[in-house]
Amino acid sequence: MFGAKTQALQKRAMEVIPLGVNSNFRFWGEGITPYVDKAKGAYLWDVDGKKYIDYRMAFGPIILGHSFDEVDQKVIEEIQKGLLFAMTSELEVSVAEMIIEMAPAVEMVRMACSGTEATMHAIRVARAYTGRDIILKFEGNYHGMHDHALWSTYAPVDAYGNKRSPIPVPASSGIPKSMREFIITLPFNDFEGFERVMRSYGEQIAAVITEPCQGNCAAINPQDGFLQLIRQKTKEYGCVFILDEVKTGFRIANGGAQEYYGIKPDLATYAKALGNGYPAAAFGGKKEIMSIIGHGVAIGGTYTNNKPGIAGAYATLSLLKSKPILKTIAERGQRLTDGLKDIFEENDIPVVMTGYPAMFSFSLNIDEVKSQRDWAKSDHNLYLELAEKAIARGVMPDHDAREPWFMCYEHSDADVDETLNVYAEIVKSVKG
Ligand SMILES: Cc1ncc(COP(=O)(O)O)c(C=O)c1O
């Protein structure tokens, strides 16, 4: 799939970096893992100089475009005034004010450097606030690399057991077995199962954490009323509702899924689009909950006020607030998703489109996808065959069918047309 320089760099990398990548998710296999030279706008170039329309967008952070000039200029201007301090700057306060203005449920906020850190801190705060230990999460959702929620994310679904009594499956060796005591897992969109578990364990649960859609499993949407049910039951049993908006925040609406679905969690977590690629993350929510931080509740980090992240967030949020950026992305994304759907239908390939125009996916040769258990039955081989053919033609979705396609402001109408032309041809070719 990739050229000689890519192959050579992978060989070199694999000698010194486990799997030759700094995150397991960037490894596609020996001989088929891309290595990047540069990116600008909606495009990236691999080390062989081949250009792609990029739909991976760094796993979602790039909302404006790669190396977006106005954001980069602000970061350069700010880092020249100092990179990192053991004290707080006015810019941090301004970023907190902007997040609070944009996110309906956020009354107070703390910054972090990654989504992993944001969800880990939110879980600590929820446990401290409730005095309880158990976390309820949904199969197929991913909340970062810490041990508290790295359960039932990517396992073969057979390992999850019966849906009436799911088995939490750790996604890695090295997670202490005793952590199992603190986790309950359920299929996403399982209304009946959720009500049953809340009836049995509600009073022991510190937090119910969920992505609004399954941003790490083909962007499977919540069914009508599912997020509302979580809101209602967590309130009833005194649990903290954590909405993990790391992928949806500042992407599907300025106010994220909270605005999109009109739902107010107790805490929300952010990263990715918040900084257009700079290392900015945040968690925040109700003042009553957030204000326990510092009163017997430890939350900190040397780099939580890193200037590139803070300045990147400041510039990105300023642009989102002042221009109809997400509206433009949504219009182009809608044309792309409609076009892809038509192509599959014209070729008699059953397709389920999921997600939102700014962050979408599709599952093939299946009629309904409500949970990871359903998605596992879709045609991954066909998805992959098409992805590899598209990449060869200069259109790059992720190699993993679970990862959504991400749009940015700089994806043009011409990029959408080119992508649809490529898919029209390759889908026809696989049908023979
Ligand atoms: C919903 C969600 N939460 C948390 C994380 C972890 O974020 P990070 O990779 O910045 O640690 C991710 C990463 O993909 C995510 O999609």
Image (spheres, helix red, strand yellow):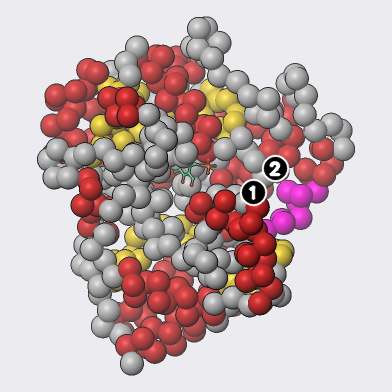
Q: Residue at x 53, y 32 (%)?
A: 117
Sequence order check, earlier mark of 2 and 1:
1
Percent x, y of residue 318: 67, 43
Question: Label 2 amino acid?
Answer: Gly
251 vs 344: above or below: above
Rendered view: 283 above or below 328:
above
- Please say if the residues under marks 2 and 1 sit with CB atoms less than 8 Å apart: yes
Q: Which mark is residue 277?
A: 1
Q: Quadrant of residue 142?
A: top left
Per the image, the residue denoted by label 2 is: 312
In this rendering, the label closer to the viewer, 2 or 1: 1
Is residue 204 shown left or right of residue 172? Answer: left
Instruction: Please tell me which residue is depicted at 37% across the width and 81% down the height of the picture.
Output: 343
For disc 1, does the CB lie below 8 Å from ligand 1? no
Q: Main secondary structure of the magenta part?
A: helix
Relative image position of residue 342 (x, y in whole percent): 35, 78
- Quarter of the image containing the C terminus? bottom left
